[in-house]
Every structure is written in C-alpha cells, then in structure tokens.
Image (cartoon, rainbow, N blue to C red):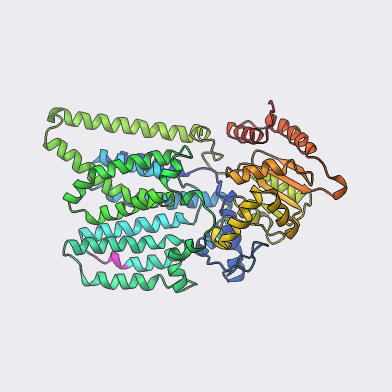
Amino acid sequence: MKLYKYPLLFIVLLFTFVVFFHSDGAILQDLGRHLTLGKIIWQTREIPGTNLFSYTYPEFPVIDHHWGSQVLFYLVEAAFSINGLIILKVCLVMAAVSFISFFSVRRADGLAYLISGFLAVEILRDRTQIRPEIFAFLFFAIFLVILYREKEKPGNWIWLLPFAEILWINLHISFVYGLAVFGCFALDRIFKAKFRKQYLYIGLALAVSVLINPYGVNGALYPFRIFQNYGYSIVENQSVVFLSSMIKNNALFYFKISTIIFLGVLPLLIFGKKYFELLTAGFLLILSWLAVRHFPFFAISLIYPASLGISYLLEKIKEKKIIPEENFQLVQIFSVLVMVIFILWEIYLTVSNKYYYVYSAPVRFGLGQVSGEKGALDYFLANNLKGPIYNSFDNGSYLIYRLYPGERVFVDGRPEAYPADFFQKTYIPMQEKEEVWQEIDRKYKFQTIIFPHTDATPWAKEFIKRIIKDGNWKVEYLDDYSLVLSRRPQTEKDSGSQNLAEIKKQGQELMQKINQQDGLNRLGNFFNLIGLTIKS
C-alpha cells in the first residue's frame, strides 16, 4: 500500500470515531428495555416468552431476537455505566469499518477509497445510537472481508462463517444478511465456474447454524414473519422517498449521492467481473430505498465496490487522457486535499457540537447521557404518583427501565409485542377521538399520564392539545421533553384553565433555565402546539 494511503485511512477512521463517540440518547428509546431484559435473563437464566412489561397484553407471546445483546449490554452497563456501552459501541463500529477499510485501501486508489469511506460514514451517521445491531455491523464486515479474501485466494478462513452465524443469530435479527451475503458469493462463484464443493458444505453449515438459538426453527424464520403482526409504522421502516418529504437528514442526502455513484460505476464493476461485490451492495441498495433501517449494512457493503469502481473510472480517465497526463496527478492531489479539508471540517462541526445544534439533536460529542425524560420519571417517583400509567409508544421502553417491576406500561416501542389491531383500534384512535379515550380510560382507570410532547405523530399532537384542557387531569410537571399529569379527584375538576396557567408558569421558569437551543426549540414547538405565547 502506498504510504500516502495511510493518512487517508486514518482520516476516515477518525471521522468514524467522532461520529459515533457521543452521549447516549438510546436509553430514551429501546436501550432501557434491552437493559431490563438483559438483567432478567441474567438473573433468572430464562428468556421471557411473553410481554411481561405491559398491563394491556401481558400474556402476548414474543420472540426476543436480541437476547444475547441484552445480556451483554446489561453486564457492561452494570460494570461500567452507560459510558461503558458508548465505548463498546465505538469499538465495534470502528472494528467493522477498519476491517473493510484495510482490505479496500490496499486494492484501490487512495482518492477512490477516501470518497467511498466518507460516504459510508455519512450514511452510518443515521444510526449511531447504542442498539443490538452494533454487533451485526461487525459480523457483517467479517463476512464480507472473509468472502472477499476467499475470492482472491481460497483458504480456511471461510469455515469461520457458520460459527460467526451462531453468535449473530443470538445477538440480532439481522443474521439473515449473513445468509444473503453468502448466497451472493455462491452466485459469483457459479457465474465464474469457480464453485468448490466445500462451499456447498459451508452453505449447509450456515443453514444449520441459524437453528442454534432458543427458538429453533421459529427463531430462524422470525425475520420473515415479524411483519405479519406489526400494527405500527416506525421511522426506520419507512422508505427514502417518504422520509425525504418529511424530514431533513444528512444521511438521506449522502445515500442519494452514493446511489448515483454506485450506478455510475456499475458498468465498470460488471466489466471487471466483480459480481459478488455488486450483487451484495446492489441488493442492499434496493432494500435501503425501501426501508432506511438497512442503511448501515449498505454503507458497509459500499466501501469496497465503490472504491474499486471509482479506481477503475480514474484509470479510464487517465488512459483516455480526458485530463492531460501532466495535469492528472495535480488534479488528483487537489481532489484529495479538498476531500480531506471537507472531512476535517465535518469533524470540527461534530466535536464542537455545532452539527448537533443545527439538527436540534440532544446528543453531544463525548461520554454522558441525554437527560430526556429523566426529569419526568424522577418527579413521578419523588412524588409517589401511581399507575396505571398512560404513556406513548416512544417512551414506553424508558418507563420500563425506570419503573419495572413496580409499574407496567400501556405500550412500548415493540409493535411485534402487541396485537396489530391494538394500535389501529385502540392506541391511535384513543389519541384522536375523545369518546375512544373515555372508553379506554374507563377500562384501565388511568391515574397518571407520562407523555412526550415531542411526539410528532398527528394523533399525539391531537391528544396533547385535548388532554391539557381536560378538567379531569392536572398538569404536574413539564420539561423540554415531557408532560406528567395526574387524575384530579372528582371534587377538584377544572375547566382546564388551571392547566394552561401551570404550563405557562413552568414554561417561563424553564425558558430561563435552558441554555441550549435544541431544548428551547422543543419547548417552543410545544407552546405553539397548544397555542401559548411565552417570552423568555
């Protein structure tokens, strides 16, 4: 490898580190539930088979396809706090990107690798939280590199894949990518008449390996069945086209750029007979357009073929003398410098937190934890408020983390853990319509509402506007994330004016305390929603 490639490799890896090294916000999403389940599994040596956290459907059967990750998360967090999980996440992602990068940069032009690596990290930026899939990133990279090497020089490393697959299926549902990647590799070998008998044995071993999980065949087939009972749409399952019309997101922009580049170099990859590389990246490109949850796997699979394709393109430009030979090297050096300066600028924006300010993201560069709904739960516990609690899909997992087993939740962020019609016939309608809310309230007799006013769904906005004017409920607590309300005694029913006065009072105090623009933005959006004008 030419010496000048090492600094370029270092810059891409530094950029990866900076992007993933930030305070944790996942505890407010699914991580809290993962930690609680990990604790239960570790202490009881059993994986719960039902939705034990919910009082609405406690007997609903669930398959815990993250159980291994949950145990590891719990053990790391118990020993080293949330900061230990942040470091674990960074190490796993850095290892995944490093494996692919070291392989790619040795075989491609430095500029080509720099462009490909930069695009991949920008797409990875879409999913930088602590999730079970961080283990999958590493396994996916291992699969790719082993199969890339097998193409070049057949050896024994390929026999590691079935053992890696056993670990993968017990850590994350994305184990199917391992099977898909091997399938693309097998097709490549068939196309080139280089299919060896041992590949058949390895394929059979991979098929058997996915059965080695607590659920056997059901666990192996679960990725293909999970959406049979999935009654609630979440962002990660939305298409690129849909999200592009809804949100501002850097990863979406760079994904589109990557699509153009990949399609542009596709003929060169075909001409170079890089069938495995283009099949893998092409397959994941299609999946990513359909659902952004596939972005990280496309990003990792993009680095090597894009590096090769751009390298081929640069070679063609040089051969055809599209750029005069005496100027070609100068143009290449200038392009590298521009890319390096741009990446260093991105690193500066991230380390200084200016990037997070622009996108109103609550995380910050470094260790630590986003406060989020901590204040609301602290208030609930300190003031001895009681359940049943009505909560949102978004904050259920954090409530589980803070309150289980003392309190259970109405819902949490697992559509597959509840009947599909629960969301369509209960959860959404009760936020949209007063009469449905009253019917469900009579059934469960809610005593406390803990609800994020940051929930951007139309039904949540309707519910927030309505509930603060409901005289049966008293606003107890407000911060830049959440509302806490308690049921008023029948003798204290109010028209709702007291709630608005309390929100205005607490809001004015908060505006004085909060010194971050993203927090002020969240409060401002809430006040606009309910029609209040509060000056700081």
Q: Position of residue 78 (x, y in %)?
A: 60, 57
| Residue 195 location, quadrant | bottom left
Question: In screen coordinates, is 527 left or right of 176?
Answer: right
Question: In screen coordinates, is 297 left or right of 310?
Answer: right
Q: Is residue 78 visible?
A: no
Q: Nearer the viewer, residue 244 or 95?
A: 244
Quarter of the N terminus within the rendering: top left
Q: What residue is drawn where x is 67% and y is 43%?
A: 464
Q: Position of residue 56 (x, y in %)?
A: 66, 62
| Residue 330 location, quadrant | top left
Q: Nearer the viewer, residue 433 or 124?
A: 433
Q: What residue is drawn where x is 65% and y is 61%?
A: 54
Question: In screen coordinates, is 488 left or right of 406?
Answer: right
Q: Nearer the viewer, residue 474 or 277?
A: 474
- Number of marks drawn: 0
Q: Nearer the viewer, residue 264 or 45?
A: 264
The overriding secondary structure of the stretch rendered in magenta is helix
Q: What residue is drawn where x is 80% and y is 40%?
A: 495
Q: Residue furthest left?
A: 320
| Residue range highlighted in magenta | 155-159
Q: What residue is drawn where x is 26% and y is 44%?
A: 263
Q: Is residue 528 visible?
A: yes
Q: Residue furthest front?
A: 435
| Residue 160 location, quadrant | bottom left
The answer to whether 86 is drawn above or below residue 74 in the figure is above
Q: Position of residue 48 (x, y in %)?
A: 59, 69
Q: Position of residue 113 (x, y in %)?
A: 28, 42
Is 516 magenta? The answer is no
